[in-house]
Image (tube, rainbow, N blue to C red):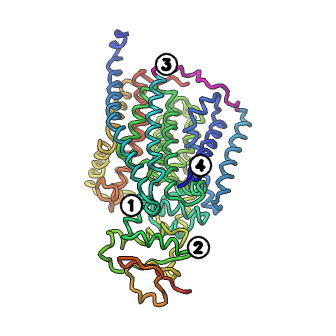
Amino acid sequence: MLQRWFSAGIATRRLVVVFCVGVTVIALVVRYSDAFRDAQDTAKANAALDMVDRAVGAGSSVFPDQGVLVEAGGLIPPGGTFTVAVGEPQPGWTPLTAGSAELFLRSYLLPRRLDPNAEWIVCLACDPNAFPEANAIWEGDDGISILHREQ
Amino acid sequence: MTPHAIIGLAALNGAYAVLGVAILWAFRGLPRWVDALRLCGVGYLIGVAAFGVAWTQLLVVGVDFNGWGVVLSLVGGTVAACAVGTLLRRPLPRGYGDPERQASPVSVLITASGVAMTGLLLEALFRAGRLQSLQAYDAWAFWVPKAKAIYFFGGLDEQVFTAFPGPTYPPLVPVLDAAAFHAMGSADVVTFHLQYWFLVVGAVAAIAGCLYRHVPAWLLWPPLLLVLVVPRVASGLLTPQADVLVDAFFAVGVLLLALWLRDGRGWRLAAVATLFAAAGLTKREGLLFAAAAILVGFVAVPARRRAAWLRLLAVTAVVGAAAVPWRLWYRSHGIGGEAPANAGAGGSLGRVGDSLRLSVDVFFDTGLWSVVPVVALIALGATLVWGDRRLGGFVASVLGLVFLGGAWVTYSYPGVPITADEALNPIVRYTGAIVLLAAAATPLLLTSVWRSGPEEPG
């Protein structure tokens, strides 16, 4: 057996195979526990979230107040339309609020569609004079509100 | 999140597996139940691919996507596959043993350990995914809105598919997500992370099932498990984007192509055509991956089997035909092409070097991929010296071409900075496909070195 191993280069090439498997197994031992622990930690962190946190997801990074997302989802009917009006950034806004609010709302509020002439206006420190026929239905902090205009 | 939604998702994914296994039975035959079990992962991926490719074409021609359509297409596809199998007089599976593989007790123990460790990890991922909120930018910015549009509006809604970011990205993943929404009964963007868990389970089962008969257990499980737990792969397995799926289609397709080059069994090529067609409709680079693998396949066909070129041409035709309608749809809606404007002709020589250097740095970054690339390269070198040189040359050429493709992507978009920052340059997620293929091919390569030379066609 050993003679066969060490003849005709069998030993060399099999040592290369054993080396590759050995390195892989060592890396696996190191990485497996880390990956398993990371998955456990993520599971725990996700379980600790409340229903709104889960439903809103990345919206918590885009909006300073989850309330606007919850209220918009409740006030605007599924077949309704909305528009987003963004004014000057306010002190409580996140770095993403001004630039990503409209894109996030378009995604989050589907099947509600974006329409410049919509009945509903999500106002982020917008100029109320631009919508003279609209009434504020909900007002949150940081200059964020939801307006409704009769059509 | 409700048990009802999870049961719906399980039923949907079970239906994908049944469809794919029925297709395998029709085109390959499954003599024993152990064959059906061994190939259920490959069958699942084929079922997902066939469903996604078919519905992409149906959506392009305006067919309404709804719950009944999902059910009818899965049932109809399965019945059609069974009818083909019956016409081809395929016998029903009989018996449970595997006469072609007499496993030693040690091999059984290693297989059991590999399955147990994989299962333990997947169980932890299941718990992480079932309450996961939607966080990744690409997911909430366009993948999920496209899925919601298909779910709510029943088709390729123009406002969503043309005005959201990534309008040229193909719709196969949104189709699967929309089917998941129907299966769950709502557009539940929390529980739907489990759809990606099912895809990961299917991909792992597919790779293991492809290799099981061709490599010993002690060479199969370590690389397969390692690639699942390396930092970049482990952190992105359940991210609701298209990267994991396109990588799985590509890696399993290349494995099947490598095995076809060895034994010439036609069902493998039919599976390759389905998987590569799906890859081209999953992400834009899927077409690049498929083209690289098929091109190398043409070169690698043994001289005595030149007739096989015709079969490869048929695969090329299937992949191309599947890719065209979606491209025509978005072009007809005024959206520009997905390739760079000058195809890379306008860059500088310095940028060529920088792009290549970046690709090398990312590929060998152990913080992302651990030792997977290094071990794969040693295995490749050893195969070229002592093992099955045709297999080694094929895998090396596919990996090399796809690697150069990644450098070309960085080079040819002047607006893409030379950085591994994933928010600015896609090279890291692109390299995931190379690493997955490297890991999946490592057992085959090492086996050919251990046994010294090519495996006898079975």
Q: Chain ID for label 1?
A: B
The residue that disc 3 covers is: B104
Circle 2 packing at 10 Å, graded few (<14), some (14-19), many (20+), is few
Checking the image for residue B342, the label placed there is: 1
In percent of width and height, residue B117 lies at: 43, 34
Q: Residue at x 40, y 27 (%)?
A: B446
In percent of width and height, residue A13 lies at: 34, 22
Q: Nearer the viewer, mark 4 or mark 1?
A: 4
Which amino acid, by three-letter code, is at mark 1?
Asn
Q: Chain ID for label 3?
A: B
Q: Quadrant of residue B349?
A: bottom left
The residue that disc 2 covers is: A79
Q: Residue at x 39, y 39 (%)?
A: B227
Of B368 and A40, nearer the camera is: A40
Say whether disc 1 or disc 3 marks the residue closer to the N-terminus: 3
In percent of width and height, residue B216 lies at: 46, 25
Which amino acid, by three-letter code, is at mark 2?
Gly
Question: Which residue range is magenta in the image?
Answer: B90-106
Q: Chain ID for label 2?
A: A
Please tell me whether residue B420 is drawn above or below residue B396 in the rendered image: below
In percent of width and height, residue A33 lies at: 35, 38
Q: Rounded to the nearest whole Å, what is the CA distance between mark 3 and mark 2?
A: 63 Å
Q: Are discs 2 and 4 located on one and the same chain? A: no
Circle 1 packing at 10 Å, graded few (<14), some (14-19), many (20+), is few
Q: Chain ID for label 4?
A: B
